[in-house]
Image: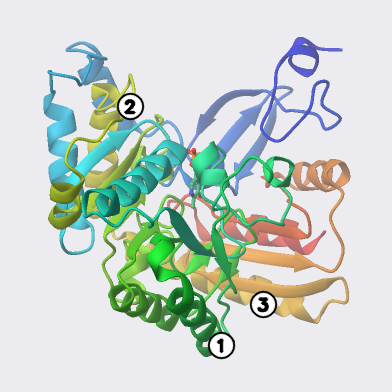
Amino acid sequence: MNFDNQHVWHPYAKIPNNVPTYLVESADGVYLNLKGNIRVIDGMSSWWSVIHGYNNPTLNQSMKDQIDRVSHVMFGGLTNQPAIELCKKLIEITPANLDKVFLADSGSVAVEVSLKMALQYWHNKGLRDKTRFITPKGGYHGDTFGAMAVCDPENGMHHLFSDVLPKHFFVNRPTIRNTSEALLDLEKILKKNHQRIAAMILEPIVQGAGGMNIYEPEYLKGARKLCDNYEVLLIVDEIATGFGRTGKLFGCEHADISPDILCLGKSLTGGYMTMSAALATAKVAETVGVLMHGPTFMGNPLSSSVANASIDLLLSSDWQTRVIEIEKILEEELLPLKSKETISDVRVIGAIGIVEFEQPLDILSTQERLISEGVWLRPYGKLLYTMPPFIISQDELKRITRAMSSI
Ligand SMILES: *Cc1c(COP(=O)(O)O)cnc(C)c1O
């Protein structure tokens, strides 16, 4: 029995873990080099984050340069140039009117900060009953307490805590078929309860970890309008969808909408460091006033410098063409699987390919099978999906889709 298995907690797992963990010795480009001379293509981009691949010389250099100046300094009363530059960039590239930035240290924390902002906004406006949130079922916003409470209430991850968590409003989740009904449901609940609701929170265009569900831009447009009509703020969580993953730089752009508060994370640093951001409009920020939140590693210079390098690298590349090429191959290779008896649905958007099986997949055997095909993917329930680094070649991508087809 190895030490990792006996003493180290892994995500969503127990100790000892009944599924093996593979030791990564190094990584380069789209490849992970596992112990025992096993080289696999990372089809997960380390949970959406490693968009430029591993060991990128430009990103490496940005951190080496920064580490010799200052790697960390507190953000209370002090500031640093990489963080200032990052905030400038984020304001420039995100949807309109978001021009006040709160830098945090993980996606969940950016969600917590966004929820706090929304509550404090209405509190300061004297509307003290607006203390609840509204969100589509099937969402995922993180594992901390505030974030947990707006995740799908039934899909399993957090139901254990349901007696402790505040009760929010859950509406029918949008899909690619039910936009008008889903909007009617949203309107019905807003109409009745808007005096108690501070904000709506949702993931744009794709719901990620809560079920890998794609929906229509019209839902986003409709939700924006309803939030305005019923005086509810709109928080858009782009932690998974941001930085090109869905074919637009941000998911909001599919519907040409702008939220009151936006959350970013995951690929913000190209997957190099932990960092997130919550951006707000001036109207929100001015009403909120002093925000009682301040992570120790807020505005970390090393994270900020690699985030700057990652954004520059993305914007100076032809990422959009690449993502469209990835989308095309995912469609060609995966959509035909719909005809298989064991598969109930296949969905593709941007650089995301999802295969949904009729039955839950056995993690152990599926994982072994994928690794023998030279591919790293993490099956989840009935879902097997890929969101590869944007730098992946056509041949490498086809190795992923063929491995998926073999399951
Ligand atoms: C991953 C994720 C989070 C949580 O981010 P962490 O960095 O894991 O805390 C929140 N929202 C969405 C949409 C995510 O995909």
Name the foreground residue: 148 vs 38: 148
Side of 202 where 119 appears, left or right: left
- Occupied quadrant, residue 165: top right
Q: Residue at x 57, y 59 (%)?
A: 139
- Near mark 3 (Cα within 10 A), the count class, few <14, some 14-19 or many ≥20, is some
Distance between mark 3 and mark 2 Cα atoms: 37 Å
Question: Is 381 situated above or below 170?
Answer: above
Distance between mark 1 and mark 2 Cα atoms: 48 Å
- Near mark 2 (Cα within 10 A), the count class, few <14, some 14-19 or many ≥20, is some
In the rendered image, the quadrant that contains the C terminus is bottom right
Q: Earlier in the sequence, mark 1 or mark 2?
A: 2
Which mark lies nearer to you, 3 or 1? 1
Q: Residue at x 34, y 77 (%)?
A: 255
Question: Is 105 situated above or below 256?
Answer: above
Q: Residue at x 67, y 77 (%)?
A: 335
Which residue is the site of mark 3?
Answer: 335
For the residue marked with disc 3, what is the amino acid? Leu
For the residue marked with disc 1, what is the amino acid? Glu
Which residue is the site of mark 2?
Answer: 60
Give percent across and percent down for residue 361. Answer: 84, 54
Ligand 1 within 8 Å of disc 3? The answer is no
Give percent across and percent down for residue 245. Answer: 43, 59
Which residue is the site of mark 1?
Answer: 181
Q: Earlier in the sequence, mark 3 or mark 2?
A: 2
